[in-house]
Every structure is written in C-alpha cells, then in structure tokens.
Image (cartoon, rainbow, N blue to C red):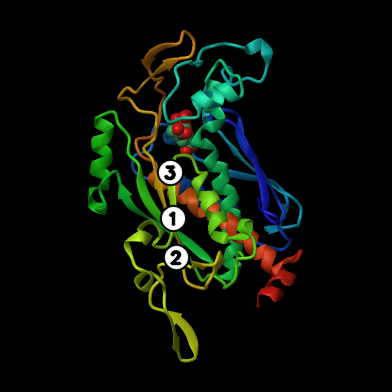
C-alpha cells in the first residue's frame, strides 16, 4: 500500500531471526541503532509480559543501506536474532531429516490464527501457523517503524502513547493489580491506548481518492497489529453521542493565525492532517492463549477438547502501544516522502521548508 516507504519482514517466533528490508529511504538521513534498541526495549517491557521476554534482549543489526551513520539511498536491512532459537534449533530446523513432532500440536486455540490458517495453508501441525502468526514479528516491525520515527524527527514530528484502560479499569493505579489478578486466575486482559503525534504538517493524505485518505491508511496500519479489534481517530468512538454543533472543531483567529479550541477530529479532516495533533485510539483484545481452559476441537480426531496452551503474556497492551507508534510512523513517513519527495536529505528538507 505504501508507495514510497515500503518494507517486507520475515521470520518465525522461534526461528533463527527476524528480518526486514526497507525500500525507498532517501540518502543522508541519520540512523542510530541505539535509538532503535531503546524502542525495542520499550516493546519488550510493560507489566504482564511473559517469560519469553526474560530470554530475549532484542537488539537490531543493520546489515545494509547505512554507512557512517547515514542512509545511502540503498535498501536498508534490519535483523533481530531470536536468542530462544538455541532452544528450538531442531524443532525449527529447515532440514527434512530433522523432522520431529516434539512441539507439534493439533488442538485449535480459539482467537488465534490456528483454525483458519491451517485450513488455508493445509497444515496438519498447527505450529506452522503459530510460528508466523505470533506477535513476535512486531519486534522487527517496531525496528522498521523506529527508523521512520527517527527520520520524522527531522520534520519535528514526534509521537508517544498512553495506556487508557486495562481490562475494565481506567485507573492507572489499579492496572498492575488487575493484571496480577488475571494472572492468578489463569486469565488474560486487553486494554485501550492512544497514540499522539505532534507538530503535524497540514495536508498529509488526500480527499481525492478513498485509498489516499490518511485516516483509512492509519486504521489499516493499526488494525492489523495482532489482537487489535478497534481503531478510532479523535473522538470517533463517541461520535454518535454528540450533535454536529458539539462535535465539529470550530475555527477561530488568534493574532491572524487559524486556531481550534477542540480536537474531536483527532487532527484529520477530509482524510488529511489539519495541523492539530494526530490522535489514534486502539483497543486490544485479551491475549487468546490462557491457562484457564477454552473449549475447542482437536483437528487430529475431530473430538471436542481443551485448547493447546503455550507460554504467553497476561497483558501486552503497553507493548502494543509501542508497536502502534511505530506502525503510524511508517504511514506518516510515507506521506512526508510523497509530499516533500526527493532522493536525498537536502532536497527533501528544502522542499519541506
Ligand atoms: C512475543 C513473543 C512470543 C509470545 C508473544 C509475543 O514468544 P513465545 O511464544 O516464545 O512466548 O510471548 O506472542 C503471543 C503471545 C502471541 O499470541 O502471538 C513477543 O516478542 O512480543
């Protein structure tokens, strides 16, 4: 979908590594791996993560497209090695002669990709679905998005997120207790967060075609993060509670400048940024792997049974918010490159100014 800033990722949850190739980066932009690693650390954190995060310390290796700290205009390759691979080498082997069923499973996990994925790709061993559908791949997506984030800083565009709800609680002081309680009960919790990007230039996106509307692009980017079930912009979630006269952000003049007193539109009108802060809200479902049993069917003998359980998180809403910041950065950088396009730093910054 992205015309200028494109990337592909590969890698399995317990495979050797996660890889991304980014295409379309202009030359001359500073890339600092420390900044990417900081964001990877943020993604690994948050209260309620599982034991996998004790094994990993996600660190990016940049293997092409950057020289002496700056992009060269060539494709940028990023790699994150899975430390846990050393425990899975035989199970995840690419060689036919290593075939084994040590970690195979056939009991569909409700809420995961297991059921539809195994029918679609004709897998008998649901491990083949789990390994790529796992949210582990959001590690490399966060690395890609952080490259975008770093470039956006040249335009003074900065993003952050805030957790608004965990389970049913909207009180920050209760979040850890809620997660502890769910964990003790063998259950999991979802939640809600907002991502805010500040200093938005006016006119990113467009009203002229449905697929150029920025809100549509952002919704796709955030909705496709594993476990996200709801995305809204600005006051979108409560939009039908207000009348037109209450919802729309009136326009005023202050010292000859256009100003608004409200931002129910969340920074987007007519599919374009209007200069106000971009506000994207998202709601994550509870992680579908839980100790408390869920009923399902075993694909091996088509008998009703209990779902396969595998190590998982109790709550990953904080991590998800970091991933969403990164995904939105990719969409915004694509728009910046479309609008101020050029092949190198100087050209683009000249167009921007
Ligand atoms: C994750 C790594 C995974 C899971 C989690 C996210 O590691 P493992 O499967 O080895 O525990 O902890 O993924 C899921 C729970 C899921 O359902 O996709 C990560 O790096 O974020």
Outermost residue to the top: 301
Please determine whether, in this image, residue 128 is positioned above or below residue 99: below
Q: Circles 1 and 2: CB distance less than 8 Å? A: yes
Count the labels in the image. 3
Rendering coords of residue 246 (x, y %): 34, 71
Residue behind mark 1 = 232
Is 201 on the left or on the right of 233, as rendered?
Answer: right
Q: Residue at x 57, y 43 (%)?
A: 140
Q: Which structural element holds mark 1?
A: strand
Against 297, residue 232 (above or below) is: below
Q: Quadrant of the C terminus?
A: bottom right
Foreground pick, 147 / 9: 9
Q: Which residue is mark 2?
A: 266
Please state the horizontal and vertical placement of residue 29, each as a whole percent of the image: 67, 62
Kindly identify the residue that appears in the image at 59 percent across and 25 percent down: 120
Residue at the location (56% across, 22% down)?
119
Sequence order check, earlier mark of 3 and 2 = 3
Task: Please state which of residues 237 and 65 is positioned toward the viewer in this rendering.
Answer: 237
């Amino acid at each position: 979908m992205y015309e200028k800033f494109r990337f592909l990722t590969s890698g399995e949850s317990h495979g050797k590594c996660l890889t991304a190739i980014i295409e379309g980066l202009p030359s001359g932009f500073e890339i600092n791996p420390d900044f990417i690693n900081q964001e990877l650390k943020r993604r690994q954190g948050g209260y309620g993560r599982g034991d996998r995060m004790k094994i990993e310390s996600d660190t990016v290796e940049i293997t092409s497209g950057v020289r002496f700290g700056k992009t060269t205009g060539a494709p940028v390759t990023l790699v994150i090695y899975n430390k846990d691979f050393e425990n899975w080498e035989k199970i995840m082997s690419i060689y036919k002669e290593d075939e084994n069923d040590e970690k195979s499973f056939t009991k569909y996990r409700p809420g995961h990709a297991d059921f539809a994925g195994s029918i679609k790709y004709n897998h008998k061993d649901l491990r083949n679905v789990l390994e790529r559908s796992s949210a582990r791949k959001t590690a490399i997506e966060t690395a890609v998005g952080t490259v975008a984030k770093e470039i956006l800083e040249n335009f003074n565009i900065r993003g952050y997120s805030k957790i608004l709800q965990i389970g049913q609680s909207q009180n920050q002081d209760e979040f850890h207790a809620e997660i502890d309680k769910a964990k003790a009960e063998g259950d999991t919790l979802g939640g809600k967060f907002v991502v805010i990007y500040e200093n938005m230039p006016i006119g990113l996106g467009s009203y002229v075609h449905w697929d150029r509307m920025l809100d549509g692009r952002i919704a796709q980017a955030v909705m496709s993060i594993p476990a996200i079930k709801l995305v809204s912009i600005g006051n979108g979630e409560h939009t039908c509670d207000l009348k037109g006269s209450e919802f729309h952000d009136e326009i005023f003049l202050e010292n000859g400048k256009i100003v608004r007193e409200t931002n129910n539109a969340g920074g987007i009108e007519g599919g374009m940024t209007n200069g106000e802060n971009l506000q994207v809200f998202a709601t994550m479902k509870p992680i579908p792997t839980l100790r408390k049993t869920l009923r399902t069917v075993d694909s091996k003998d088509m008998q009703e049974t209990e779902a396969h359980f595998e190590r998982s998180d109790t709550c990953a809403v904080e991590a998800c918010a970091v991933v969403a910041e990164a995904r939105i950065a990719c969409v915004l950088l694509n728009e910046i490159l479309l609008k101020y396009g050029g092949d190198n730093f100087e050209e683009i910054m000249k167009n921007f100014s």
